[in-house]
Amino acid sequence: MSDPVDLKAKVRALPEKPGVYLMKDRLGRIIYVGKAKSLRKRVSSYFQPSRDRRVHPKIKALIETIADFDTIEVKSEPEALLLEGRLIKQWRPRYNTDFTDDKRFLLVRVDFAQELPRFALTRIRKDTRSRYFGPFAHSGLLRKTLAQMRRQFGILLGDATPQKLPDGTWRLYDDVRQEIYATGNVVTAADYRARVEAACAFLDGKSREWLETLRGEMQAAAEKQAFEKAAELRDLIAALERTLARTRKFERDRTLLRPDQEALDALQAALGLAGPPRHLECFDISHISGTYVVASMVHFTDGRPDKDHYRRFQIRSFIGNDDFRAMEEVVGRRYRRLADEGKLLPDLVVIDGGRGQIAAALKAFVAIGVEPPALIGLAKKHETIIFADARAPLNLPLTHPGLNLLQRLRDEAHRFANTYNADLRSRKLRESVLDDFPGLGAKRKAALLAHFGSIDRLRAASPEQIAEAEGIGPKFAAELHAWLRPPAAEPTPPAAVP
């Protein structure tokens, strides 16, 4: 396999002539065929560092897969076009196949994961949770239709930046871009969802309506003996029909098999589980150089975050930096409590880490006398799955839906742990202000924090309320109150008016 330096040297040797280039992966397989007016300029564009910031993710994936390339020089651009078509039919390269048909058409994407779903344009399906409409052959007409729908239904397009108001409602557009005429600009999320459903129902029939329009245009062109125009419209209709058929199949399959269920089934097969892991729990440890050590546990039900079952832990059994001991403590605390309460354990426990963290979790189950459920570790460096038994580590393809579910679970545990760590550090920093008050020892400081719960509530308390804390007398309470709330600076008098 050639390295980037070899590829760049190979590019510099290319001629400034038309031709066809064949991109290959590390196994020598042809993954893309393209034509070029100038082979050197076109092929070199794939290896420009600034290109990554502009390209579509699918094209970026192609670029990252390229390990080598070949070129075929021809005499003219038309010859390059014909040769490109023959080679694509002969080799059926992966990325040419992916780009066929629907690359010519726009789709409308509505992401229902957003609190206020927006109507955005795309050419490629990015996920299975959004709803897509199309494909649409007339991009200009589609944009005009969306603009009309924004006025008629009061929906948001992809570039909108709505503002959430203090009472929980939303202002969809600012005063400068007040583009909603038939409907109100300030709505609740529920009211807006009703608008989205109405707009979706309207949009659902548009691609089929425009397909009929194209057929009418083709018939009219044929009657006028504009055969070149009619042939162009015929090819466009055929490609649109193929893409539309694929869209119908996608939507049908999407209703038959939920994406989350697909991921759960894939994970069951990959890990050899008795059934789909409907209940997943994941643990993560977070600390800063051994201080403020905390742990998080997140819970997914049927592939989705179930925040009512999230838990946060402060480490109690030791002070210092030992991820293994911390993992042993929190796993033991979590499942001892479930066992004591007679509650079911999850179908799968995931530990953020490798062999050492898995061993610590197993040690915790042994210590509490509980039979562990299915237990794995996810080592982030190579996304390697570590089993608690004698099985060899497992590396699934990065596109594997089961692995993607584990990654979402692990990333959520990491986010939750880091958030808790930041909150704890912030609270400790606020509490440390008491260390500077003369005569306040550790015992009375602990009594004050236990009584008020936070330094902010202590600041807001009166001297009489402070004196209610254990071990705090009236005189000391008054002095502490004055120290915590110093008198405001004298206001600056207004300047004299001459």
Image: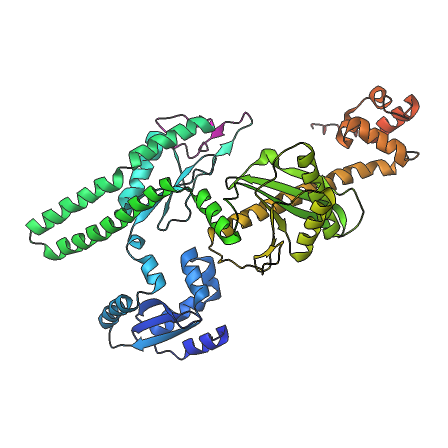
Depth check: give the residue in front, 280 or 99.
Answer: 280
Q: Is residue 22 left or right of residue 467?
A: left
What residue appears at the point 75 percent right and 43 percent down from the top-left corner? 315
Residue 44, x across and y down, in percent: 41, 71
Tell me, what colour scheme is on the image?
A: rainbow
The magenta stretch spans residue 41 = no
Depth check: give the residue in front, 187 or 274.
Answer: 274
Residue 277 visible in the snapshot: yes
User: Looking at the image, is 142 positioned above or below residue 400?
Assistant: above
Which quadrant of the view contains residue 10?
A: bottom left
Residue 485 visible in the snapshot: no
The magenta stretch spans residue 183 = yes
Q: Is residue 387 left or right of residue 204?
A: right
User: Looking at the image, is 456 positioned above or below residue 104?
Assistant: above
Residue 157, x across and y down, in percent: 39, 39
Q: Which residues are magenta?
A: 167-188
Q: Point out the image quarter for the C terminus.
A: top right
Residue 34, x across and y down, in percent: 32, 67
Residue lying at the far bottom of the rendered structure: 13
Residue 169, x across and y down, in percent: 50, 27
Q: How many marks?
A: 0
User: Looking at the image, is 219 positioned above or below residue 9?
Assistant: above
